[in-house]
Amino acid sequence: MRPPKIVFILLLLLLALLCGCAARYDTVAEAVRDGARIPRGVTIDGTAVGGMTMEQARSALMRAHEEKQKTTRFTVVSSDGSVAFDASQLPVEWNREEVLLQAVNQSLLAFTGKDLRCDMLLHAEACRSRLDELCAPLCTAPKDAVAAYRGGAFTYTEAADGREVDVAALARDVTSAMAMGGKLTAAVRVTKPAYSTEEAMADTALLSRFSTSFASGSYGKKDRVYNMKKAAQKIDGFCVAPGTEFNMNRVLGARSGENGWRKATAIRYGAYVEEYGGGVCQVSTTLYNAVLLAELPVTERHHHSWPLGYVSIGQDATISTDGPNFRFVNNGDKPVYISALVDEGEKTVTVRIFGEARTDGLSVKLRSKKVEQIKNPGSKLIVDDSLPAGTVLLERESRGGSVSETRRLFYDAAGKLVKEELVSKDKYRPIKGTVRVSPDQKQHAMQKYDIS
């Protein structure tokens, strides 16, 4: 006997009621406030969450996902080695809230053992930053070249290329393999140093060299050589930064016994005297000529009372603690280095200037000559009654004066003079001598020193 038609209608209504009786939530927050539970039989990523509240399901999933991250391992290999890590070390996020909302909205009758799945997501920027740290053992920083001065020359520590992992590409590979992990091959690129060996060598090229000799006369006396060595050691290796001035007196300091200087012959007020630091002028003179050859602007320089025997006329530079100084400026964009060495075997003082290499192909020479002679003014006789009989004292020798010109000459690679310029025009003033005698030596002194 067939059931009445009304029974089928009631069954359909009951089925519709059962399928549509569950509330629909737009947000997880709504479901939490309503105390909703996930329909029985629902699983997410294999975790049974059916019958749980939203908070219970969220906690269960967080534990499962933490375990999943720990067991999802990656090995990144390159030609420089390998590193291993798991997903828990990466900036991972899960779309748990989205899937929990989907689960709570499941129809009891429509859901038939379906396992919902969450996605493990990576933030690209954060991932690249973290992979930078994790892959650091596979990377080598590039090394800049280093120039070091010692003993009159430079030595160089070679620049070296670095290697770095292409973390942007690796991040994409990790993202693709998030579900399973596994072995990944890192793309490695070469990174160049910021400062190459060639640049270091070009920035410390030999710009000029000048030597003077102390082999003749009294120039090689022991204490004078001591002072020259001390002065040379103080300026040897000195770096003059771009745009700064080198001040010889400042670098040497006051010449005194307390500062370790010795007394030796020097020229002061037109006469030879013994003073602390005698001989340092040969170092300043040698430096002056090297500076001229390197075309560095000289800001202060003074010539001696008369031309010297160890350098051409017009090419000397005198200094004293409380008087004349020698100064020049580094007007370039790169540092300038001074090398100063005293060779007691060869009896020479040699100064070299190092800096940015010339690019014009020219070489530089100096030429000095006397252009005018000034008459010797003779001597003044002083008769001193206090002197013992027979005394003749030459207090200051008379000297004629002179005028000199020093020029800088520029030659091309073929040795052709292409330019010249006047560096200085120096006037060595005549010096009137002074002779002090006892009264009985007046006539003798007048004849000997041609005093009228």
Image (cartoon, rainbow, N blue to C red):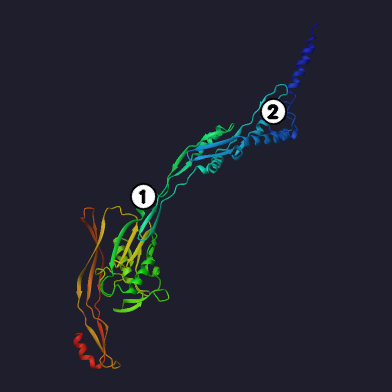
* Image quadrant assignment for residue 336: bottom left
Q: Which residue is mark 1?
A: 198
| Front position in the image: 233 or 202 | 233
Residue at the image point whose x is 60% and y is 37% from the top: 87
- Work out whether 190 lies above or below 237: above
On the image, the x and y values in percent for residue 313 come to 24, 70
Q: Amino acid at mark 1?
A: Glu
Count of numbered tags? 2
Q: CA distance from mark 2 to mark 1?
A: 66 Å
Q: Nearer the viewer, mark 2 or mark 1?
A: 1
Q: Which residue is mark 2?
A: 43
Q: Quick one: SS at disc 1?
A: helix
Q: In the drawing, does residue 203 fall left or right of residue 118?
A: left
- Work out whether 116 lies above or below 153: above
On the image, the x and y values in percent for residue 287 come to 32, 65
Residue at the image point whose x is 30% and y is 68% from the top: 285
- How crowded pointer 1 is (Cα within 10 Å; few <14, some 14-19, many 20+) is rated as few
Residue 64: mark in rendering: none
* Image quadrant assignment for residue 26: top right
Q: In the drawing, does residue 139 fall left or right of residue 260?
A: right
Which badge, 2 or 1, is on the more N-terminal residue? 2
Residue at the image point whose x is 78% and y is 15% from the top: 10
Residue at the image point whose x is 31% and y is 74% from the top: 221
Task: Look at the image and tell me in which quarter the N terminus lies.
Answer: top right
